[in-house]
């Protein structure tokens, strides 16, 4: 549902031609999985998810592997009770309304209220219900982009609500606190990983005063939504819902690694920031069937234990 320029359309058509055969092959393999395999945490399922969930199965698989479906089953109808009657002066409702029209205005589903394809009311409902259930978070900028892309996959408000709630409270706890402390911590973790894995880039950033909070806000807060091409975002989320937040660092490290020569060629802060802006629009990232395998190779070993250790360091520094 996204509008494209002529150049973007040509690149997209070329990508779709290559990707269609990949999707067909994957789809056949997924059909062979039985229900118990889908509910396991097996190496086979992990491998299948990393290679991409077929579009027609993505909604069900996300709901299942994230734990959102189980939570929905335990509290049927709870979502509807949260919607209740929205008061005119409701603070959460007013915050959500402010951001609605900024959410993918180039997408037919989020252009305006009332047209037959519009998801605007659904987007408002999910974000409002989430804010009511989670008053400590309320409505946080970035959640509009995340929820919009979820709705395009699950096509059901109640499912999108539970998927969002599971993501924020179970998979990425602390990410969306108003203090932004988690974002600062993730930037610290990424900085230390770059120092270890890409020392020249780390030195360059230090020399020119480039900091990760300047360039990665949407990477972490929007989980690459409104940053990378949509199918690439969905492939990242396939992994996120099953394996957790580590994949966000894998993507960041791969983007930086693939563009390190361009970065190291910069001689001032503005040109370095421009490279960061351009690296997410590169042809590399459109071709998700070649980009996604790279995120599991390029950063090499990345144990969750290491990430947790660096997060604890960041926390100690903040305290």
Image (spheres, grey):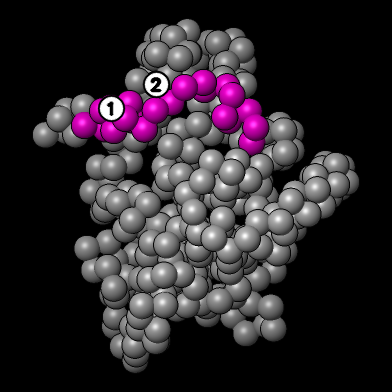
Measured from the top left, where is residue 181 in percent x and y?
25, 42
**Which residue is drawn at the image coordinates 66% and 63% (left, top)?**
57
Say which residue label 1 marks: 310
Crowd rating for badge 2 (residues with CA inside 10 Å; few <14, some 14–19, many 20+): many
Q: Residue at x 53, y 33 (%)?
A: 251
Residue identifier under label 2: 193
Which circle marks residue 177 in the picture? Answer: none
Identified at 67% across, 82% down, the residue is 115
Q: Which residues are magenta?
A: 292-312
Magenta stretch contains residue 184 = no
Can residue 24 be seen from the camera position used here? yes
The local secondary structure at tag 2 comes to helix
Q: In the picture shown, does residue 184 fall above or below 77?
A: above
In the rendered view, would you say 225 is above or below 216? below
Task: Give the mark, 2 or 1, whose residue is nearer the N terminus.
Answer: 2
Q: Is residue 293 magenta?
A: yes
Residue 239 in percent (x, y) is at 53, 46
Instruction: Give the vertical position of 55 relative to 9 (above or below).
Output: below
Secondary structure type for disc 1: helix
Above or below 98: residue 3: above
Between 165 and 37, which is closer to the camera in this rendering?
37
Tell me residue 263's x, y (percent): 56, 16
Q: Are marks 2 and 1 in contact (CB under 8 Å)?
A: yes
Within 10 Å of the Cα at label 1, are there few (<14), some (14-19), or many (20+) other Cα atoms? Answer: many
- Residue 9 as seen in the image, left or right of residue 294: right
Q: Position of residue 240 (x, y in %)?
A: 49, 47
């Amino acid at each position: 549902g996204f509008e494209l320029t002529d150049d973007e359309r040509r690149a997209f058509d070329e990508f779709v031609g290559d990707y269609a055969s990949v999707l067909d092959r994957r789809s056949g393999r997924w059909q062979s999985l039985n229900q118990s395999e889908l509910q396991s945490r097996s190496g086979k399922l992990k491998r299948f998810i990393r290679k991409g969930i077929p579009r027609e199965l993505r909604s069900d698989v996300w709901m299942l592997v994230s734990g959102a479906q189980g939570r929905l089953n335990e509290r049927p109808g709870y979502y509807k009770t949260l919607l209740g009657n929205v008061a005119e002066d409701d603070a959460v409702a007013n915050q959500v309304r402010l951001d609605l029209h900024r959410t993918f205005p180039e997408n037919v589903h989020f252009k305006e209220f009332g047209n037959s394809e519009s998801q605007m009311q659904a987007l408002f409902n999910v974000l409002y219900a989430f804010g009511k259930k989670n008053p400590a978070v309320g409505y946080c900028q970035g959640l509009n982009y995340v929820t919009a892309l979820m709705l395009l996959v699950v096509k059901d408000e109640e499912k999108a609500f539970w998927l969002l709630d599971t993501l924020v409270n179970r998979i990425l706890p602390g990410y969306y606190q108003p203090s932004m402390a988690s974002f600062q911590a993730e930037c610290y973790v990424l900085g230390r990983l770059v120092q270890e894995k890409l020392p020249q880039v780390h030195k360059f950033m230090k020399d020119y005063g480039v900091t990760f909070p300047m360039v990665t806000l949407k990477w972490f807060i929007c989980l690459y939504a409104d940053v990378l091409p949509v199918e690439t975002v969905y492939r990242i989320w396939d992994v996120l819902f099953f394996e957790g937040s580590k994949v966000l660092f894998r993507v960041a490290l791969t983007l930086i690694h693939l563009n390190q020569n361009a970065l190291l060629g910069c001689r001032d802060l503005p040109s370095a920031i421009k490279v960061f802006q351009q690296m997410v629009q590169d042809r590399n990232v459109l071709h998700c069937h070649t980009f996604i395998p790279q995120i599991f190779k390029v950063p090499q070993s990345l144990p969750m234990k290491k990430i947790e250790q660096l997060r604890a360091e960041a926390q100690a520094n903040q305290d």
